[in-house]
Amino acid sequence: MADLIELLQEANIIGRGGAEFPAHRKWRAVRDAPGTPKYVICNVSEREPGVFKDYHILARHPEKVIAGMTLAMKTVGAAEGIINLNVDYEKKFKKALDKLLAKAKEDGFTLRLFEEAPGYIGGEESALLNAMEGKRCEPRLKPPFPTDAGLRGKPTLIHNVETLYDIACVADGSYDNRRFYSVSGAVPNIGVYRLPCVLTVRDVLTETQNLPAAPYFVQAGGGAGGVVLNADQAATERVRGTGAIIVHLTNEDPRALLLDWLRFFQRESCGKCTPCREGTYQLLRMVEDNDEIPWDRMQPILDVLERTSFCALGRSVPVPVLTYYKNVYSKR
Ligand code: SF4
């Protein structure tokens, strides 16, 4: 087989956990980084509302995910593979995964499960490294990146479930430029669909027989940090990030929608940095305490969150709020 890293580059395999970082660059970085032992981690976190494709993949194709891990371990020279498993998924998948890990052991690969630290931040890659080391589960300052100094300070390759699935498909020749979409919200056919990567949001809704007859908008990429698009934008924009599409009807109560987002961010803020800890609290209070949404008073706090939050969770808060205001609310 040709060099797998080159094949990943040719196939343009990117991270499907949200960041969309090219897989081949991570592999080269870990393979070439000094320091041993090296590690490969499969991140089964998936705690964002409206994102459930990793569950689907683990239920139907766990062998592909483990194949992706062992290919990665062999290529970058990793001594151990670890699956950071969402505790809510553990009951469902532990038995099947244990069997696959035992089989991998017969083939010379050391893999184990790690029960994820609770909360959304438990899936942030540097926070999960801290949790695996028995430290407080909160993000680390980057750089250094995990590819240089990850688990116990050693080079570590961290991939999402779908990315590892794609990698196994590239290796066995079955990769066909498709990705998994989680479709939910005000649609009749909620589910996970594997369709071409190039489809627009509207194409995905049409293909899955989920295109609403009533006026609608979507949140795409994730149910918390995903961008909000109106129906015109949905006809031209592709789905980024985690591949989630959540459909809303335009008659939905704006305040209830904002409260859903802000309650999520406020609850999941790890509290490490002041802008996110205090900002999410203040934003939630403002909307809870007012019958009218105080957009003008929210704007400065959203600016601070975007500019000064320590990690992506805090920086994500303005994304749904401001795109909803700009693309949907202000056009009513
Ligand atoms: S932005 Fe929020 S989640 Fe991230 S480190 Fe700061 S408090 Fe924690």
Image (cartoon, helix red, strand yellow):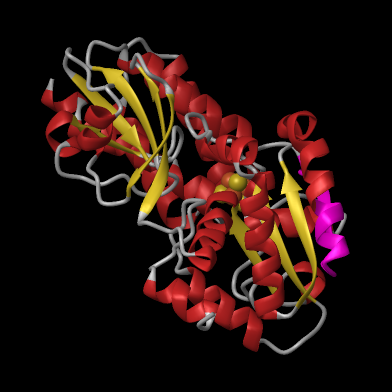
Q: Count the marks.
A: 0
The one of 101 and 190 positioned closer to us in this rendering: 101
Relative height, residue 173 to residue 183 (above, below): below
Instruction: Kindly tell me whether residue 275 is visible in this rendering.
Output: yes
Q: Is residue 274 above or below residue 224?
A: below
Quadrant where the N terminus is found in the figure: bottom right
Q: Is residue 109 above or below residue 36?
A: above
Closer-to-camera residue (116/96): 96
Q: Give the magenta range.
A: 101-117
Residue 68: x, y in percent?
62, 61
Q: Nearer the viewer, residue 316 or 106?
A: 106
Q: Is residue 194 magenta?
A: no
160 displayed left or right of 91: left
Quadrant assignment, res 156: bottom right
Is 283 placed left or right of 230 in the picture?
right
Residue at left offset 35%, top offset 10%: 291
In magenta segment, residue 104: yes
- Report which quarter residue 220 is drawn in: top left
Q: Residue at x 82, y 37 (%)?
A: 95
Residue 83: x and y in percent read 74, 52
Q: Residue at x 71, y 71 (%)?
A: 73
Viewport quadrant of the C terminus: top left
In the image shown, does 279 or 48 lie closer to the viewer? 48
Q: Is residue 112 visible in the rendered structure shown here?
A: no
- Residue placed at 83% from the left, 55% from the top? 103
Q: Quadrant of residue 151?
A: bottom right
Q: Position of residue 257 (x, y in %)?
A: 38, 20
Could you tell me residue 40's position as x and y percent? 71, 66
